[in-house]
Structures are given as C-alpha cells and as structure tokens.
Image (spheres, helix red, strand yellow):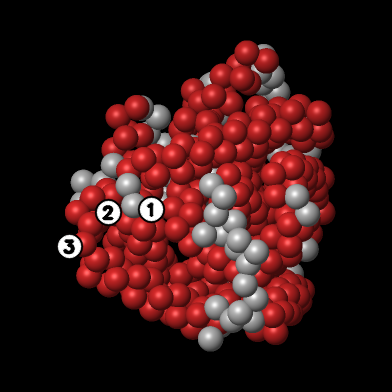
Amino acid sequence: MKKSSNKLTLFIFIAMVVGIATGYGVWLAYGAPAGEVVKTAATAAAKAPLTPPEVFADRISILTDIFLRLVKMIIAPLVFSTLVVGVAKMGDIKAVGRVGGKTMLWFISATFVSLFLGLILVNIMQPGVSLKLPLPDTHASTGIAKADMTLRGFFHHVVPDSVIDAMARNEILQIVIFAIFFGVAAAAIGEKAQPVVKLMDSVAHIMLKVTGFVMNFAPFAVFGAMAAIIATKGLSVLIVYGKFIIQFYAGLFSLWIVIGLVGWLILGKRVFRLLAGIKDPLLLAFGTASSEAAYPRTMAELEKFGCDNRIVSFVLPLGYSFNLDGSMMYMTFASLFIAQAYEMPLSIEQQITMLLVLMITSKGIAGVPRASLVVIAGTLSMFHIPEAGLLLLLGVDHLLDMGRSATNVIGNAMATAVVSKWENKLGDGDDAELLVNK
C-alpha cells in the first residue's frame, strides 16, 4: 500500500512538472504579444479563431477530459452503493439522524468560517484595488448562467424527481437523498433486505476495484491539464495576476491552518497522520482542478486511517454538496474583489448579508458546471455589482480552482474523521493493502 501510494504521488508530481514544461514550450514556440493575457481574461466570452496554442490545449486536454469522465462514470454507483450499505448497517433512523446532525453541525460551521475568513482577508488585502487591469464593459456577457436564487429553486435541486436522471447527471446530493431513503427502508424491513444490502456491498467493492484501474490514468490527466493551461496562458499569467493568485492562496493556506487546528483539538496528534495520508487525493485534486476526481481515493484513505466505513459512506458524499470549504472562501473573495475593482465599496451590513446569501445559495449545486462562478454571478446581481467583472477572473479561474479543489478535499476528509471521533467509531487504522490498490 505504502509503496503503491508513494509511486502514484511521484508520478502525479512528475506529470505536473512535465506538463508545465511542455505547455511552456508550446507557448514559447508560438509566442503571444505583450498584454495578451490581460486581453484573454477580459474577453474570455468572445468568439475568435483558435490560436495554435489553443488548438494544442484543446487536443491535449482530451487526456484530462477522459480521466474526469471515467471518474464521473464511477461516482454515482460508488456513492449510491456505499451510502446504502452504510445507512442500512447503522440499523435505525435514530442513528442516521444523530450522525447526520453532527455532520451538518460541522458543515455549517466550516462553511461560515470559510466565507467569513475570505471576507476578512479580502478586506485586508484589497486585491481589487491593487490589481490594475482594464475593466470589462459592464454590459459584457460572461456566458455564465445565474443560479436559481429562490427557495423553490433550491429544493428542486435538492430533491430528485427521478433517481435515474440524477445518476445520469451525477447530481451527488440528489443521489444522496435517495440513497438515505433507500438505506433507512432497508434497515427498517430487516432480514428481507439483507440480499439487497449484500448486493450493494458487492457493488461497492467492485466499484473500488474499478477505481484502482481509473487512478492509474491520473498522471496523464494531470499532465494534460497543466500543459493546456500553460500553453494558452503562459507563465506570464502568474506575473499579471501574480499578486491576486498569491493573496488567494494565502487565504486558502490560512483556512488550512484553521481546519488543521480544529482537527488537532479533536483528533490530537493523529491529525498529522490524516493529512499525510490524504496527500495522493490532495495532489490529484490540485492537478486536475477537480475535488470529485479525488473522491474514491479519499474514501479509501479515510478507511485506512481508521474511520468507520459506515461513517465514511455517509459523511463524504454529503460533504461534496455541503462542505466545499475552498469554494466557499473563493465566493466571498471573488465577489468582493470584483466590487473593489469597480470601486463599489460595500458596507459591513451589505457584506454580512452577502455572506448569509452565499451560505444558502451555495448548497446543493455540486453537480453544476463551474458551480462557484454560477453562484457568484447570481450574488453579484443582487448587490448591483457588474457581472461582467467575472471576466477578470475567467483567465485564471483554472489556477484558482486547483487550490480550492484541494482545500475541498482537506475539509471533507477532516469532517469525516471528526464525525467518526464524535461517534466513537475512529479505530487505529490498518496498514493492510486496500482493495482499491490490489
């Protein structure tokens, strides 16, 4: 297990470095006039013929697309089977309610801390004031649909009208809702449900084996992602937006420290073992800019750490809809950055209102493409801030998404370990080779 894990980490890291070098080679070969990065960020939604670097990026990113599609292929059956087994084995609705209550307590607290920390840091750093960029026209289209901000829209997204449709679209939260009902019903009828529970348990093990096959493709996906972004943006994107990127990553690092400290208070010194154990899914999420890609590996590492598989099967899927800590910080950080860029200061009352709005509207949209930007677009309009300001961020959104995806993995792993501890279901862990790595 250890040897296999270290190999994957090494291969992903090598793929990241080689991808950056390859992308930069393409960038140097075709070059771009000075200021192209700013132009790209400000006109991201405009249609134009593809340049040679963009053609290269479009083709090399097929590697990343294939990997992410493979991951999405296994997410629905993996989440459904493991959650049904986990809930059914808990035995009764009271146990589900108790674990669910503790889980939501952590999620709501973590969401508030992430949003509030982002709000504080963006007010201190003032990135929108210091970043001197030509502002997009206030009427420019971003090409990003707004989130449905109504209460009806929220519940329509949470509750599935067809579980088949939810699985087809990988709507994790809707799958979770149906799986909880299914698992509770299975527990309620007892012995008659055992054949189905055993079947679901077998499906879960099969999907973990499939996960092992899929993970072998991860280094190629990371290579494709890094080569594509550097080929089209060049390393100069780090210079033009360098200050903003550094400030945002400093904010994420601050959030890591807060999450780690709370974890240390509850888990003690074992928190360091947990953080060391999730380095593979962390690096995978960072390289592919997708926390979903790291889901199967995170599940395996948490069980190895000692978390009860029933807790893991219950908490982790919920976390992917309700506990996206990195995305939460980005929402306040980006919203206020755009307000600052357009010199539209918001009062403390308005900022607190924005924070509360984001807490509500951000829930349950994990399956929406570019979910953070969708929520931000809807929130900006509520406060009469030009939505076109999002064009300032589109050029570097992938680089920012890498950090927030990795942060989401840390937040969900910590939440699962903490809830396991609260339920007295946190064992010493097992260094034996897991099925996913066999």
Q: Residues within 10 Å of mark 3 (few under 14, many from 20)?
A: few
Please name the amino acid that badge 2 sits on.
Ala
Mark 1 lies on a secondary structure that is helix
Front residue (pair 268, 220): 268
Q: Residues within 10 Å of mark 1 (few under 14, many from 20)?
A: some
Please name the amino acid that badge 3 sits on.
Lys
Rendered image: mark on residue 192: 3
Q: Which residue is mark 2?
A: 187
Separation of marks 1 and 3 at Cα, in angstroms: 16 Å
Q: Earlier in the sequence, mark 1 or mark 3?
A: 1
Q: Position of residue 13 (x, y in %)?
A: 73, 75
Mark 2 lies on a secondary structure that is helix
Front residue (pair 81, 22): 81
Front residue (pair 217, 264): 264
Please name the amino acid that badge 1 sits on.
Met
Placement of the N terminus among the 4 image quadrants: bottom right
Q: Position of residue 300 (x, y in %)?
A: 55, 69
Q: Which residue is mark 1?
A: 90
Side of 342 where 188 appears, left or right: left
294 shown above or below 372? below
Side of 415 where 377 appears, left or right: left
